Amino acid sequence: MKRFWEMNGRPAPIAKQRTLRPRAGAPLTSRAKLLWTLGNLCMLIGVVLLLYVGGIYSQAAFDRYAARGDTDLPAPAAVVPALDQEPAPFIAPILNSGSADAAEGQLVGSVPVANQAHTASITRVVIPSIAVDSKVVEVGWDVQQQNGQDVAVWQVAEYAVGQHRGSANPGEGSNIVLAGHVGGYGKVFKDLYYVKPGDQITLYSAGQEYLYTVQERLLVTEEGVSAEQHAANAQLIAPTDHEVVTLVTCWPPKGPDKFTQRVVVQAIPFNAASAQAAGISSWSIR
């Protein structure tokens, strides 16, 4: 047959090879069983990881929603110190942790002294210019050792804005200290850097609304500065003899200088002078 095709000048066709397949119902070999088991195990692990990651993101989305000021859901919980660890008077902490590679800069100061309780009353903060409408929760501190000394590391609420325990409430005539993350899931103060003098801030406290006008936005360096500069920075969140709202977050959120600076925004109560400067009738002030 091959000679016939060669005589006609054409190559002989290649015979098809038959593929041997195991008969239906034939027992699997040990290798096949191993591969089958590994395949099913990988699929099971994949499903578990998918459910786990999905659960994390679902919880984060729920917490972000719960932290919004316009919802009735309870704000995400924040750990606060026991009542016998109240700061008295409020001690202005240094604004950094002394570690540039930390997950995010911290507020560090002396361990507060036990005293009579001072309850934070702010429940919500609204900053229209940067689309912030967030619940406010009271935050405390964790005691850690740094350079052989016990220091208080102030907590920052994960999704909401945190009011420093012991700082003033609206109407008390002193410094109201509020801090929030620039990164992480919440990123509640991710745009605080862009607040400008003249912008308005509204605080909700004890069933009332308090309106404030931004006076200045500062950017202070925390890493690699002198002790004198640290002390000057700390005074920005120290008690004052007049009412002021101080908002703090870390900056910049990324890059080689990540979290080495702090954005500090300070606002004073909105009054008749503020209204005239903004071209608003003083009759609208409440």
Image (tube, helix red, strand yellow):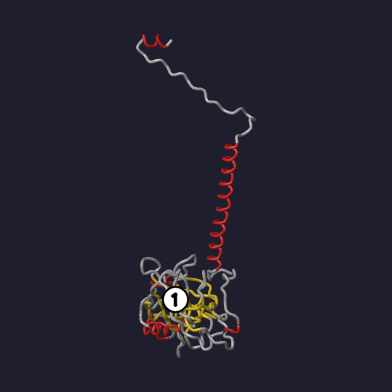
Q: Is residue 219 in sight in this rendering?
A: no
- Residue at the image position 58 percent from the left and 46 percent from the top: 41
Q: Residue 129's image quarter?
A: bottom left
Callout 1 secondary element = loop
Drawn side of residue 73 relative to residue 249, left or right: right
Considering every residue shown, the one lying at the far bottom of the view is 241
- Quarter holding the N terminus is top left
Query: Toward the viewer: 165 or 173?
Result: 165
Query: Toward the viewer: 198 or 253?
Result: 253
Residue 183, position in %: x, y?
45, 67
Q: Is residue 5 in sight in this rendering?
A: yes
Query: Toward the viewer: 173 or 41?
Result: 41
With respect to residue 42, does 132 lie above or below? below
- Residue at the image position 58 percent from the left and 71 percent from the top: 77
Mark 1 closeness class: few <14, some 14–19, many ≥20 residues within 10 Å: many
With respect to residue 188, does 208 lie above or below? below
With respect to residue 169, does 26 lie above or below? above
Drawn side of residue 108 relative to residue 47, left or right: left
Query: Toward the viewer: 115 or 223?
Result: 223
Q: Residue 198's image quarter?
A: bottom left
Residue 75, position in %: x, y?
57, 71
Q: Number of marks in the image? A: 1
Instruction: Kindly identify the amino acid type of the residue bearing the numbered disc 1.
Output: Ser
Residue 142, position in %: x, y?
53, 77
Residue bearing the label numbered 1: 97
Residue 268, position in %: x, y?
43, 83
